[in-house]
Each structure stands twice: as C-alpha cells, then as structure tokens.
C-alpha cells in the first residue's frame, strides 16, 4: 500500500510540474526559444554533412560589394538606372531562362529618369516570365494612403483550418511599385518575412493579407511557375485543410499558426551560384569580362548581397544571409517538396509522456542510480538521434526540449518515489531486525545494544539511568491452564500496558520468554522504583482477554537497578536487576525490589 501511495504521489508531483511547464507562458516561450536553437543545430549538421544539395536550376545575379562599387564609379549613384536592368534582362532572355525574378522593389517613379522607368515597365510587357517584388507594412495613413491593388494580384484561398491566425501576416498599408508595372503585370509577389523572437528567420509567409484579400509570397509565385513549366502543374486556387496543410501538385506544406512555412536550408550564404551584376553590365556594354555562364532553363533571381544595402538576415545556417538567398531557398523548397513539417504540440506532449514513462520505469526497476542515469541518458539520446534522422530523411521536426524536460521531471520524480520506498523498506527491515514479532517490543539484541549505549552516555555526561526487569508471575502454570494462545495474548497485553505507562524516551524490550525489560534514561533510583510500582499496580488492576472469550488477571514481579550504584557496565546492571527480580518473586511476587 505504501509503495502505491508513493508512486501515486510521484505521479502527481510529475504532472504538476508538467502542467506548470506547459501553462507558464514565460517558461513556454523560453522552451520554444531553446527548441528553435536545436532546429538550427540540426539544420547546420545536415548542411555540414552534405545531406542536401541546392538546386542547380537557381542562379542569383547579385549586387555585391564589387557591383555596388562599380555602379557608383560608372553611374555616380544608387539605385541603378532602371533601364540597365531592362538591358541586363534582355541579355539573359537571349539564353531562354525559365524565370527572371527581382528581389528588388521598384518603388516611386524617378522623375529624372522617366525613360529608364518606361524601359523597365516595357520589360514586363515584353516577357511573361519576369517577376518582381512588393512589400506590405503598417505605416500610418498620415504618411501614405493605402493603395488599392489590382484584382489580378490577389489569390483565392479556401481555409478550413481553425488553427491559423493571420494576425502576424495582416497589414494595413503597402509600398506600391511604379504604376506602369503594377497596373500591367500580375507577376508581382510580396517579400514580407517573419522572424522568431530571437531574430532568426526560420519561416516565411506563404500568403499575406491586405484589405481583406490574400496575396502570395513572391517565391511562391516563382516556384509555381517553375512547377508549371517543368511538371505541368497549374495552380489557380488554393485550399488549406482542417490540419493546416496547404496541398497542390503533390506538394504538402504544413502551415504554422501564423500562416508561415518552415524552410529547409541548403547551406550558408553563398550556397547558390552568384553572378555579380557588374559583369553582366560590362557584357551588355561590350566591355571585357570573364563572364562565362549560360542562363538556359534557369530561375534567375536579382538581389543585393552588399552589406551597405541592408538586405541581410540571420538564418539557422548563417548569421549573415542575404534576403535574395532566402527567396531562392523558398523556391528550392517548392521544387524539392522539402518544407519542414513540425509535429503539433499535442503529439509532442504525448511523445514526451511516453518517454517519461519509459525513463520513470527504468529508474524504478534499476537498483543502481548510476546505471539508471546512464540508461535514461541512452534512451533520450536514442530519441534525439531519431528526431535528427526524422528531419534529415523525412523533413519532420520532432521537438526535443519538451521530451527532455518531461524525462528529467520523470527521472527526479521516480528517484524521489524510489527513495521514499527504500526509506520505508529500510525502516521496515530495521523494525524486523529490532522488534519482537509477538509483543512488538524491542528484541533482546536491541536491548543489549541500548544498554551499552546508555552506559557510554552516562559515563560521558556523568548522569544516571535505570533498568527494570519484569517477569510475569506463574506464567508457565498460566500456559498450562489456559493454553499457549492465551499466554501469547497475555504477553501482548502486558507489553501494551508497559508501553502506555512509561515515557516516550523509555525503551521497553522483551528480554526473553515471559521476561521484559525497561531502560529508563536519566532516571535515578527513587524515580525508577516509583515507575516500577506504578507499572506493577497497573498490570495487576487490568483484566486480560484470553482466547475463547475468557478473561483473567495476572501479576508481575520487577527488579530495579540504577547506574552507577548497582553496576558500572551493562552486564553488572542486568545481573543486579535480575537478582532483585528473583528476590521479588521469592518474596511473594506482585512487587518491586
């Protein structure tokens, strides 16, 4: 029964800690932050081990530091005149790329370069595979009146999930690009990003909301165009099922509560082939360049990597990662159907409970605390390894921090339970070793130990203690008359009477047979005799219940000895008390000597 109570209390303690860890918002946020770091670590290990390879179909034309310097030297200012982009794209289109996408926003018409803006706008009329970016924000209407966007930019999304909360990707304003592009082309996507609380970009919105309409991410539009060209997948409308899964063309993207998708990363900055913009500019100007690259069937992104142009983010695999490479990673995930699916929290809790149950069982069953610790660590290590391989081969994110917390709580809880059970077992074994089974008094061995201890203590502190030895009068004749069961009943009841008539610090023992003893610490001779007289009287007054509903009275004889007057060691005190006991018996019994 005690073990069951301890186990139940251990479970209650464990579940209370679990509930506190799950329900506490600050603690939960901290756990999520640490869990995100484990995601980063797993992604980095996979990248360093060469598990994933970035698509060769994606190339980036970059405004790097060298290109930025070239532009300032040759054009005198940034941004670059927009007709230069038109000329560069014309050059690339001669090699039949699949898609050309600008991770650049052509906002506001440059009054001093109207013809340059027109040349860029004409580019979108000339080629239907050219895409560009726009950005939503929450700027006040005092600064900018929210524009109404063309109908062709919005998409139809049927959402059957109750778990999605679009608040983080819902915006009230927009930085519109130049009208000649905005009003003509529908190849416009948004490049808003979402970061975790620690500033690391691990997810990207699939859609954004503005003026009650839903708009696609630029990379989503680019990726869908790639799938249309390569796999013949033509997606017009989108549907999100009850489990927050967006499905199309054999692709399944598990959306997070904020509507974002978790990206699978292919490497640090510079993973994708990068071609400096200045080399293309030199090529179109017939200047000497070592450019030797064929854009045939490539997805060509334009973006900035120069630190001074401020389009730098931190991602799981690198602290400095250009925004254009994030767009490329997003497209790559679509091409490979490689987005990460994170196991929902309820399933994580269930997994954590199972792991905790296994570890708790190990702790309870393995006697050695060292072995239990090592086995528990091995079990958790196997789980972590499994979680790593699940992400590596299945793109599934199993959390490892909640299971760790549950495992630790289970380990500690079961150690406490085990300690309580062992303590109880020790007490029980100790009681068996020191207690007489019939009378539940201390046994003779314990009596001898206590006598030696009392003598040593009395010598050290120069104090007194007394000993009373007791014998039940005519006990053999009593057994012969009433039977041994009745004799045992009398022994138990006399023992109980003795315990009830002494102090809590007095030690009542069964000396042997019908003889019992009482050790009285810090009691002198007179007080010991007074106690013995009281006990003798109480025993004689009591009626004892025997087997067969019979009753009888018994008397006892008592011998008293006191240290140091009657002996200076245990044996001499016992001998003295024993002699006085026999004097009492020979003097008529039922008395103290």
Image (cartoon, helix red, strand yellow):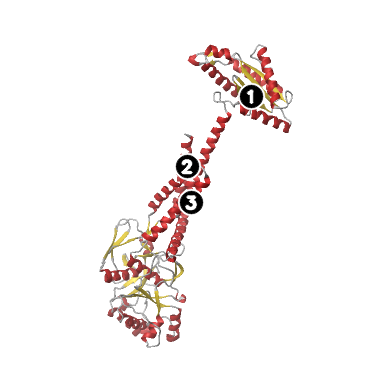
- Dot placed on the residue nearer the N-terminal end, 2 or 3: 2
- Dot placed on the residue nearer the N-terminal end, 1 or 2: 2
Please indicate whether residue 7 sits to the left or right of residue 149 in the image: right
Question: Would you call the spot at circle 2 few (<14 residues within 10 Å), some (14-19), or many (20 or more)?
Answer: few
Q: Nearer the viewer, residue 312 or 482?
A: 482
Can you say whether 198 is above or below 529 in the image? below
Q: Nearer the viewer, residue 222 or 490?
A: 490
Q: Which mark is residue 334?
A: none
Q: CA distance from mark 2 to mark 3?
A: 16 Å
Residue 159, percent from left and from top: 30, 59
Point 32% across, 59% down: residue? 245
**On the image, numbered disc 2 is attached to which residue?**
365
Quadrant location of residue 228? Answer: bottom left
- Dot placed on the residue nearer the N-terminal end, 1 or 3: 3
**SS for tag 3?**
helix
Q: Nearer the viewer, residue 359 or 302?
A: 359
Question: Would you call the spot at circle 1 few (<14 residues within 10 Å), some (14-19), or many (20 or more)?
Answer: many
Residue 175 seen by the camera: no
Quadrant location of residue 536? Answer: top right
Residue 561, percent from left and from top: 70, 22
Residue 19, percent from left and from top: 44, 48
Q: CA distance from mark 1 to mark 2?
A: 42 Å
Q: Which mark is residue 518?
A: 1
Query: Disc 1, disc 2: CB below 8 Å?
Result: no
Quadrant location of residue 229? Answer: bottom left
**SS for tag 1?**
strand
Q: Which mark is residue 377?
A: 3
**SS for tag 2?**
helix
């Amino acid at each position: 029964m005690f073990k069951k109570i301890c186990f139940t209390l251990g479970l209650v303690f464990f579940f209370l800690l679990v509930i506190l860890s799950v329900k506490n918002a600050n603690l939960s946020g901290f756990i999520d932050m640490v869990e995100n770091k484990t995601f980063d670590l797993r992604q980095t290990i996979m990248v360093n081990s060469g598990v994933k390879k970035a698509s060769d179909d994606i190339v980036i034309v970059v405004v790097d530091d060298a290109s930025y310097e070239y532009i300032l030297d040759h054009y005198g200012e940034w941004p670059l005149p927009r007709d230069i982009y038109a000329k560069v794209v014309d050059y690339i289109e001669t090699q039949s790329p699949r898609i050309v996408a600008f991770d650049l926003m052509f906002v506001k018409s440059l009054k001093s370069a109207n013809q340059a803006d027109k040349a860029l706008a004409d580019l979108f009329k000339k080629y239907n595979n050219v895409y560009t970016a726009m950005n939503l924000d929450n700027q006040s209407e005092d600064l900018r009146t929210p524009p109404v966007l063309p109908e062709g930019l919005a998409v139809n999304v049927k959402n059957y999930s109750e778990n999605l909360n679009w608040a983080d990707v819902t915006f009230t304003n927009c930085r519109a690009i130049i009208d000649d592009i905005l009003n003509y082309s529908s190849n416009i996507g948004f490049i808003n990003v979402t970061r975790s609380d620690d500033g690391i970009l691990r997810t990207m919105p699939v859609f954004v909301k503005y003026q009650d309409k839903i708009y696609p991410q630029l990379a989503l539009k680019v990726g869908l165009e790639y799938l249309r060209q390569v796999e013949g997948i033509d997606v017009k409308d989108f549907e999100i099922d009850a489990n927050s899964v967006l499905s199309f063309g054999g692709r399944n993207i598990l959306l997070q509560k904020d509507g974002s998708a978790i990206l699978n990363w292919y490497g640090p900055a510079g993973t994708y082939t990068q071609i400096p913009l200045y080399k293309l500019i030199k090529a179109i100007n017939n200047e000497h360049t070592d450019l030797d690259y064929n854009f045939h069937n490539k997805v060509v992104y334009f973006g900035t990597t120069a630190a001074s142009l401020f389009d730098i983010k931190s991602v799981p695999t690198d602290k400095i990662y250009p925004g254009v490479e994030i767009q490329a990673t997003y497209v790559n995930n679509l091409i490979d159907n490689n987005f990460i699916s994170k196991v929902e929290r309820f399933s994580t809790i269930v997994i954590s409970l199972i792991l905790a149950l296994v570890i708790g069982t190990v702790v309870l069953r393995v006697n050695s605390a060292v072995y239990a610790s090592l086995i528990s660590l091995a079990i958790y290590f196997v789980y972590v390894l499994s979680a790593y391989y699940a992400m590596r081969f299945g793109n599934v994110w199993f959390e490892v921090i909640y299971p760790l917390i549950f495992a630790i709580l289970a380990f500690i809880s079961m150690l406490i339970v085990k300690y309580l059970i062992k303590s109880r077992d020790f007490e029980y074994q100790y009681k068996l070793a020191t207690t007489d089974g019939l009378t539940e008094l201390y046994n003779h061995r314990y009596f001898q130990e206590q006598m030696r201890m009392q003598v040593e203590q009395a010598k050290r502190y120069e104090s007194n203690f007394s000993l009373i030895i007791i014998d039940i009068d005519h006990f053999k004749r009593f057994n012969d008359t009433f039977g041994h069961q009745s004799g045992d009943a009398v022994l138990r009841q006399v023992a109980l009477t003795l315990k009830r008539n002494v102090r809590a610090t007095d030690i009542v023992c069964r000396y042997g047979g019908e003889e019992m003893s009482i050790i009285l610490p810090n009691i002198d001779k007179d007080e010991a005799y007074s106690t013995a007289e009281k006990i003798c009287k109480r025993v004689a007054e009591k009626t004892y219940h025997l087997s067969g509903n019979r009753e009888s009275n018994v008397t006892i004889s008592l011998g008293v000895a006191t240290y140091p007057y009657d002996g200076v060691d245990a044996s001499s005190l016992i001998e003295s008390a024993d002699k006085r006991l026999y004097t009492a018996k020979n003097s008529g019994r039922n008395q103290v000597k």
